[in-house]
Image (cartoon, grey):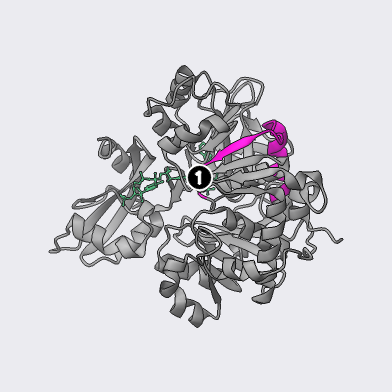
Amino acid sequence: MAENYLFDGLLGDKLGSSQNRNALFATLPGDGRRFTYGDVEDVSGRFANVLLGLGVRPGDRVAVQVPKSIEAIMLYLAVVRAGAVFLPLNTGYTPAEIEYFLGNATPRIFVCDPGKRADYEALTESLGIGLETMGVWQDHETSAGSIPDAGLAAPTAFDTVARAEDDLAAILYTSGTTGRSKGAMLTHANLLSNAQTLVDVWHFTSDDVLLHALPIFHTHGLFVATNVILSAGASLIFLPGFSAEAIVANISDATCLMGVPTFYTRLLDEPAFNRDLVRHMRLFVSGSAPLLAETHVQFEGRTGHRILERYGMTETNMNTSNPYDGERRAGTVGFPLPGVKLRIADAETGKPLPQGEIGIIEVKGPNVFAGYWEMPEKTKEEFRDDGFFITGDVGVVDADGYVQIVGRSKDLIISGGYNIYPKELELLLDEEDGVLESAVIGVPHADFGEGVVAVVVPKPGARLDEAAILENIKPRIARFKQPRRVIVVDELPRNTMGKVQKNLLRDVYKTLLES
Ligand code: MLC
Ligand code: AMP
């Protein structure tokens, strides 16, 4: 049988008549359903047949904005098996935001939540994109959307389409500093190599059970968490989302947890989350945003476990990790993963800097993406001539080789692990009646790490109202990107070049979201 690099690489040893087919893949607390690796093969096979019937051909994009469910993971695998390209979208995005992604990626079909179908009918029709639905599959009696319905009637056997290592497996959009999102093209080899590396360095085996509470439309929850588990033949306890109570209720059956720093600060606020509860745990991983050294220390004090922090990006998958066996150093993201080259370079010249100096983190390796979808110029700008990708993160390597992230050269806010690009919001705010100009900044936020604040200047004679501005932008942009506060000022601070001094604004408003 021809090889599908990612699917066979992740699951080859669990397919067909293999004993591993019977192994448990996932349980859903509260729902009682259990999925084996055999179910993974069968259901992804059904969905792949459905996709084929819908006209999906190798290389086609399949855009998906669906609630978190195990079937959504099966759909991801079905897209890969059909040789197509999986394009997951944040469930919080509004139709106005989705319009851009569909227009840019021109997928063959768009799969949405059944409850949102009406919002997308006109749009998909005008773009010539098929519209399908998929909700949470409650039982086999109630329809959960067109894809699961058709899946029930489709055969489980599917002749998986051959795909090579450099073929695309997924496109994940990441916002750009100019306000326009860019589709990061991830190949089969990008995803498989990273999953296999992480299985090795984090010592995953088929005995592991990951408590999965992350969303599955981003690298962290979809690729790091899910691909690692599939590759190791391990299991998931699949929660619909994060809640400290659900973690406490289910952690005794798990061996590991992966989360953004907000997971860990919220768990520390939960008295029932204590040493006894997590004595049996093997591993806690944190990433997607900086974990405060203070959280690391508090967590160890409370539980006796040292959180393992790692560093990644949509474009690169995982780049570095603290060691499994050696010292997990708080405030650092550890060492480059095997196969990943990392250097600190001068932002302007790209010249590598000596150890101990602060500069831009640049990486190269099998994990690094193939470029931005239909944006060759952007792709060129973000790679050096020798193939290193310019991350935009500012870092330093200490004398022992640990990488520390000290800032970002890109104007980006990371709130609860979600990236928010100020430019996108500024463009929206500037369109508001009476707004002359705006500056969007991130300031400390106890729960989300950073919270969004908008500073706006009225046009001469105009009066601006915070509540009205917030209300107006509501339908246009996902809730997590909306400012927590809008501050009206007479003018923005500028340097002699006329550039807005966001550092001064961040300083003025640094305690605004503290309470
Ligand atoms: C929810 N809200 C947020 C938010 N999450 N606002 C800002 N930032 C966020 N991250 C909104 C809600 O809509 C709600 O709005 C209000 O804030 C409070 O919500 P909540 O109920 O407290 O939030 P919750 O649903 O519990 O979600 C918080 C969270 C979630 C931290 C669990 O944001 C989350 O799962 N984050 C993980 C993101 C992630 O997976 N990132 C990985 C990217 S990959 P209202 O209207 O009620 O006020 C990547 C690469 C790598 O970065 O290295 O991994
Ligand atoms: P995304 O584009 O959503 O993949 O976000 C990637 C960005 O998240 C990186 O460029 C970093 O700025 C940030 N990031 C990821 N992991 C960490 C970490 N452990 N510490 C600090 N920042 C991180």
The number of numbered badges drawn on the structure is 1
Q: Residue 43: horizontal and vertical position, in percent?
A: 67, 59
| Residue 199 is at least partly visible in this image | yes
Q: Amino acid at mark 1?
A: Leu
Drawn side of residue 92 relative to residue 25, left or right: left
Question: Vertical placement of 494 versus 514: above or below?
Answer: below
Residue at 42%, 67% in the rendered image? 115
Q: Residue 453: horizontal and vertical position, in percent?
A: 30, 47
Question: Vertical placement of 202 versus 88: above or below?
Answer: above
Residue at 28%, 48% in the rendered image? 484
Residue at 67%, 22% in the rendered image? 325
Residue placed most toward the observer, 56 or 197: 56
**Dot 1 corresponds to which residue?**
239
Drawn side of residue 177 relative to residue 150, left or right: left
Residue placed most toward the observer, 255 or 331: 255
Drawn side of residue 25 relative to residue 465, left or right: right
Extent of the magenta region: 191-215
**How many other residues sit within 10 Å of disc 1, few (<14), some (14-19) or many (≥20)?**
many
Q: In which quadrant of the rendered image does the N terminus lie? A: bottom right
Q: In which quadrant of the rendered image does the C terminus lie? A: top left
